[in-house]
Amino acid sequence: MELLSRKATCNSHGQDSSYFLGWEEYEKNPYDVIKNPHGIIQMGLAENQLCFDLLESWLAQNPDAACFKRDGQSIFRELALFQDYHGLSSFKNALSDFMSENRGYRVSFDSNNLVLTAGATSANETLMFCLADPGDAFLLPTPYYPGFDRDLKWRTGVEIVPIHCSSTNGFRITKLALEEAHAQAKKLNLNVKGVLITNPSNPLGTTTTQTELDILLEFISTNKNMHLVSDEIYSGTAFSSSEFISVMEVLKNNQLEDTDVFNRVHIVYSLSKDLGLPGFRVGAVYSNDKDVVSAATKMSSFGLVSSQTQYLLSSLLSDKKFTKKYLRENQKRLKNRQRKLVSGLEAMGIGSLKSNAGLFCWVDMRHLLSSKTFEAEMDLWKKIVYEVKLNISPGSSCHCEEPGWFRVCFANMSEETLKLALKRLKKFVDDGNSVKSCQITESQKLKSSRKKTMTTVSNWVFRLSFQDREAEER
Amino acid sequence: MKQLSTKVTSNAHGQDSSYFLGWEEYEKNPYDEIKNPNGIIQMGLAENQLCFDLIETWLAKNPDAAGLKKDGQSIFKELALFQDYHGLPEFKKALAEFMEEIRGNRVTFDPSKIVLAAGSTSANETLMFCLAEPGDAFLLPTPYYPGFDRDLKWRTGAEIVPIHCSSSNGFQITESALQQAYQQAQKLDLKVKGVLVTNPSNPLGTMLTRRELNLLVEFITSKNIHLISDEIYSGTVFGFEQFVSVMDVLKDKKLENSEVSKRVHVVYSLSKDLGLPGFRVGAIYSNDEMVVSAATKMSSFGLVSSQTQYLLSALLSDKKFTSTYLDENQKRLKIRQRQLVSGLEAAGVTCLKSNAGLFCWVDMRHLLDTNTFEAELELWKKIVYEVKLNISPGSSCHCTEPGWFRVCFANMSEETLDLAMGRLKEYVESTDSRRSISKSSHERIKSLRKRTVSNWVFRVSWTDRVPDER
């Protein structure tokens, strides 16, 4: 008899060490401006490190928030005992308002429809448990966040069927692609429960357009039992609030608030990207369907947010002077930093998808591939890790269908480090190294291991090995 | 086609409002010494409120810990970014040592075998996902914590088969009960993957004896299955005997590096010992590296806030604090339990002799109209509505004998406990204890009970307002 569950053991099969290599290499040899200036620069972690100063100065001015005090009085006991899965109402109110502010107050969020979870990782999995049974499927536009393979599928038994997006139209979701994905799911005998998008997109760094949102809403209107999950974790990273259109806005503008579609649209949020607080594990599910809210609330028992953290953040987000300043400053700095990456890349003849959000750019290195294959993408990636000493994310790990695209993060390092990274890359490009193949034996080894793994293991297992050291790096 | 998953829709079936009543009534009319002295006293929440002063004093003396500073320097950024599912090393080290200290430093815990989780609720569910397939079963001795029905079964698809324990031997686990449960599972065509015990027990408040632990280890050895020991109450032991962990037994039997040791897993949490349920700190300890590896990845779905990990690593690293705390905690729990036990005795009510936990397992069989669960429910409603005490009926814990109730003592002040005992005494002494409630309400309850719904759904409705109150 099997001693462990399949969920526990399938983990160890087909770990593709070539993906794991990037992380391993970085950890063996991490760049440090003083201690290790020739180390590998981490550009694969979608963290927002640009506005910690704002947070730290707020904390310094408001010491009560972290120290369990309210108006100078200790509320430690109250917080220590607070485990109500309905969440701290002051926090939910502040969070709902913050979400609204992020959307230029064009929509409002009712805190009674908000369910707190330990990060968006937990929120997404919980939504799957609520909306789908094992064997059901969700359609996701490619490229998508590699973590979804684990978060949406692993313990839930749900399947992902890709909606193929291509560079020909900036990777936008088309009605045709959506219908094709639906048809493909049917061919695979999978019951489609809905569509999940990330808006703004990871890894593209683009906000979903009005057209795309209309297409998606029309799709779930026609398919009466389908849901639309919009993971808006990057909503506060849109360089301008007016460019970010939430699906909630479209519902409101199209006066769909009293229709049944309204109950089938759910939003996921988190403070990990906008506020740069992934360690605090703050996520949320927002739904207009009270059964979903009720079930998700009970399920949140498995991943509640620490009351200590809820209290700190309720104070922070209730400070409207702070949130206004923060959102504005965050947008400014991100836009600035992205410009630096984009122009730096342009200077060496590398283009990237025109982006208006996110903590990364979707970089086009197709012209640097030795051949238009994923093998060549892997070869290039390894060169960039080992020789250029930059850890970036290959498009294939995001299920991109075209080889040669890479996600490159820009908000998790200082300006100087970004400059250095660009300098290294430029040297590599200028040296024409992009076409030189690496040592023969290494190349052969890679080729054969790639062949094996491409055919037999699903990407989520790659991702697991990839993430074996560092989880949660969207 | 269904719009929502089966997990969600099955929830709505058979919600028995009579259980929900206890909580509802309490929330409508909660006791407050000043504002509502005639309100319902909450005795159904297993919280440890006895030692907050010790923690608050420590916090006042060590402001850096909560202030996100280390040696006066801000480490906010570092903590804000820390989301490694391997956990904060200094926290796991401190936690491992704390767990050792609770066990008199007789056994060692390797921090690398600890997996942090958002509370033991998350830890237990994660272990189920790692050890069982949907449809597999775990054997649990009754009575057991009602939350297990949700935590172990809901999303995992695992089943629970009860190991029937009876008052005839103080609800101890016997070999025949174990074997019977195993056979029952087989009869139901369920593959048994292991046994799960809570030690010390909730709701009994007793520690598992060495005999029971030996029996369990032998049993899982012979059946080649797992043993999960939820030791969430390990720091609440106040009796003369020391707490014997399953880890002690493995060591004493020299099984520490054996095959069977890989199938023994411990669950822990700081919710009861330290009284910090709001902070969501739980852990899985396993000697099986595959379990540790899988559980670590699964912990992504319920990581502990780095802010909280840091605070508690500082607290638990302070050995002066931990030894004082554990000592004082035991003392105060013992005194408080004594107060409850004697208060009950004065009302002619006895309870199972206990040496741990935050509650007593109280014997009210003599107050039942009939030896039935219907009568237990009636008595319970009287205690909620008339005596104005919210206590937990044994049937909600799957007890096979009617008339037992779990009564908590550590979540209120001494005065409130006195008041509660006074009320109970009054009730028992008055002839009203034999008076039946009005007919129509009686009939309604009878018909509600007859509907056959699983207890976990009761529990889900019951916990609709306040979850996780073990």
Image (tube, helix red, strand yellow):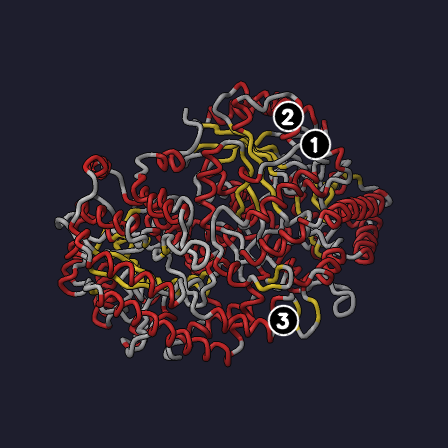
In the picture as drawn, the residue positioned furthest to the top comes out as: A222
Q: Quadrant of residue A229?
A: top right
Residue B201 lies left or right of residue A468; in this view the side is: left
Residue A379 visible here: no
| Mark 3: amino acid | Pro
Residue A84 visible here: yes
Is mark 3 in CB contact (under 8 Å) with mark 1? no
Residue corresponding to mark 2: A252
Q: Residue A106, labelled with which disc?
A: 1
Q: Residue at x 76, y 55 (%)?
A: A54
The percent coordinates of residue A266 (x first, y second) are 55, 34
**Real-space Cα distance between discs 3 and 1?**
41 Å
Q: Residue at x 78, y 45 (%)?
A: A328
Residue corresponding to mark 3: B63
> SS for tag 2?
helix
Chain letter of the residue beneath label 2 in the structure image: A
| Mark 2: amino acid | Lys
Chain letter of the residue beneath label 1 in the structure image: A
Q: Quadrant of residue A35?
A: bottom right
